[in-house]
Image: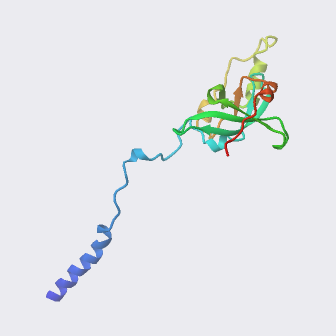
């Protein structure tokens, strides 16, 4: 009987071993982000995004985002001109000057056509894309209030080595 009792104690110790060796509990749930929220964009998706001016003319594309030590985006580097990256002129503008939009350029052109004064029968229906686009990984394009010539004449941005 003592032999059975000793085997039961040893068996219990063997089975309880993994439970006692369990790792420490995970830190508070507030320390980790588990998913992207609506209205958040991945920086990797902003690189290469087309930049248009207020006249809906393409003036360049985003080459880089400049981030300070606190994680705040301070400037956007826009590549202007060139072909396939050759002869391109990099210009940095403050982040606050860039407006990002989820509305595609095609939809913007359609809305502009409906606003023409000659078209008096234009529909007053406006399609809202906020719900569908709230979960996009990136905006459709960026808008900067400048012309391509102004950006070409702007000082070249130089990266630190």
Of 96 and 13, which appears nearest the observer?
96
Q: Is residue 131 left or right of residue 61?
A: left
Residue at coordinates 18% horizontally, 86% vertically from top-left?
4
Q: Is residue 15 left or right of residue 141?
A: left
Q: By what rule are the colours in the image chosen?
A: rainbow
Give coordinates of residue 18: x percent, y percent: 33, 71
Give coordinates of residue 157: x percent, y percent: 72, 35
Q: Is residue 1 visible?
A: no
Relative height, residue 87 to residue 144 (above, below) = below
Of 5 and 31, which appears nearest the observer?
31
Give coordinates of residue 150: x percent, y percent: 79, 24
Q: Quadrant of residue 100?
A: top right
Q: Quadrant of residue 147?
A: top right
Q: Is residue 126 visible?
A: yes
Q: Is residue 154 left or right of residue 73?
A: right
Where's the N terminus, which quadrant? bottom left
Of 44 and 5, which appears nearest the observer?
44
Q: Quadrant of residue 51?
A: top right
- The single residue placed furthest to the front in the displayed view is 161
Relative height, residue 160 to residue 155 (above, below) = below
Give coordinates of residue 21: x percent, y percent: 32, 68
Residue at coordinates 75% horizontally, 29% vertically from top-left?
52
Residue at coordinates 82% horizontally, 25% vertically from top-left?
149
């Amino acid at each position: 009987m003592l032999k059975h009792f000793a085997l039961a104690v040893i068996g219990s110790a063997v089975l309880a071993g993994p439970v006692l060796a369990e790792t420490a509990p995970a830190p508070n749930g507030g320390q980790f982000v588990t998913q992207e929220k609506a209205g958040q964009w991945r920086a990797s998706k902003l690189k290469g995004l087309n930049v248009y001016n207020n006249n809906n003319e393409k003036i360049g594309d985003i080459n880089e985002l400049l981030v300070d030590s606190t994680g705040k985006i301070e400037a956007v580097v826009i590549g202007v001109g060139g072909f396939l990256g050759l002869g391109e002129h990099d210009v940095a503008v403050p982040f606050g000057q860039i407006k990002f939009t989820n509305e595609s350029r095609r939809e913007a052109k359609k809305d502009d056509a409906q606003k023409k004064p000659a078209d008096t029968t234009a529909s007053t229906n406006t399609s809202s894309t906020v719900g569908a686009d709230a979960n996009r990984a990136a905006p459709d394009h960026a808008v900067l209030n400048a012309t391509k010539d102004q950006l070409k004449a702007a000082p070249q941005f130089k990266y630190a080595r």
